[in-house]
Amino acid sequence: MPPIPPVTRNLMLICTAVFCLQLFTPLLDAFFALWPVASGRFLPWQVVSYGFLHGGMGHLFFNMLGLWMFGSELERLWGPKRYLQFLLAGVLAAAVAQLLITYLAGSRYPTVGASGGLFALLLAFGMLFPNRVIMPLFPPIPMKARTFVMVFGALELGLGLMGSSGVAHFAHLGGMVGGWLMIRYWRRQPPFGSRRR
């Protein structure tokens, strides 16, 4: 197994450390979770800080597993700077999507988790390595990366439209859109201009 590249490793350690702090300092959520604008508790830095918080051990485990599975290879491909830019785009786009959904739904509950950035990584992995066969934990069926991305995207959309489940499905989709836009920007493809010939 190749070593975990530095940015991915450090992000995994930071998220785990912050989760441990959350167990002893509940006030972290009050200031650093992503609160809906209408709640009166929204603060500008929350559009980034929420990505370091998690709602439970299972939430943390699966996000860190995904970060390791998809982020490690993308960091090796892009390098630390571009990798961080991409993750930030996913986290910010997920935050914007979640703020919009909570505003429309009138929700006053906060959002936490690195899932927005993770779904951006998932999309990028499917775009860059479409024929790579992966074995998800649920369901344990081998499938090509592009199929995996399409299945998860469709599931998130369907579950989001079905109603409240305590999971920020539209934030996940927002992360995917943010990742897609970032790749389009790097490739100078619409809506950011046309590719040079």
Image (cartoon, grey):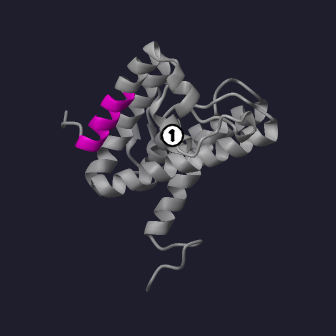
Instruction: Tell me if residue 191 can be seen.
Output: yes
Q: Is residue 30 left or right of residue 130?
A: right
Work out which quarter of the rendered image holds the N terminus and state it. top left
- Out of 150 and 43, give the one closest to the viewer: 43
Residue 137 seen by the camera = no
The quadrant the C terminus occupies is bottom left
Query: Does residue 8 belong to the magenta stretch?
Result: yes
Specify the quadrant of the image occupied by residue 15.
top left
- Against 197, is 182 above or below? above
User: What residue do we see at 44% from left, 83% from top?
Assistant: 196
Q: Where is residue 70 in the image (x, y as percent from the top left)?
A: 38, 41
Does residue 70 sit above or below 181 in this rendering?
above
As displayed, is residue 121 above or below residue 188? above
Q: Is residue 55 left or right of residue 63?
A: right
Magenta stretch? 5-15
- In this view, the residue farthest toward the top is 24
Which of 143 and 189 lies nearest the eye of the viewer?
189
The prevailing secondary structure element of the residues shown in magenta is helix
- Relative image position of residue 168 (x, y in whole percent): 64, 33
Q: Which amino acid does label 1 sit on?
A: Phe
Q: What residue is shown at x 50% (from left), y 53% (from top)?
A: 179
In this view, the residue in front, 41 or 74, is: 41
Q: Going 30% across and 49% down the picture, which residue do you hit?
A: 75
The residue under label 1 is 148
Identify which residue is drawn at 44% across, 24% down: 60
Does the segment drawn in magenta span residue 183? no
Looking at the picture, does residue 181 appear above or below residue 21?
A: below
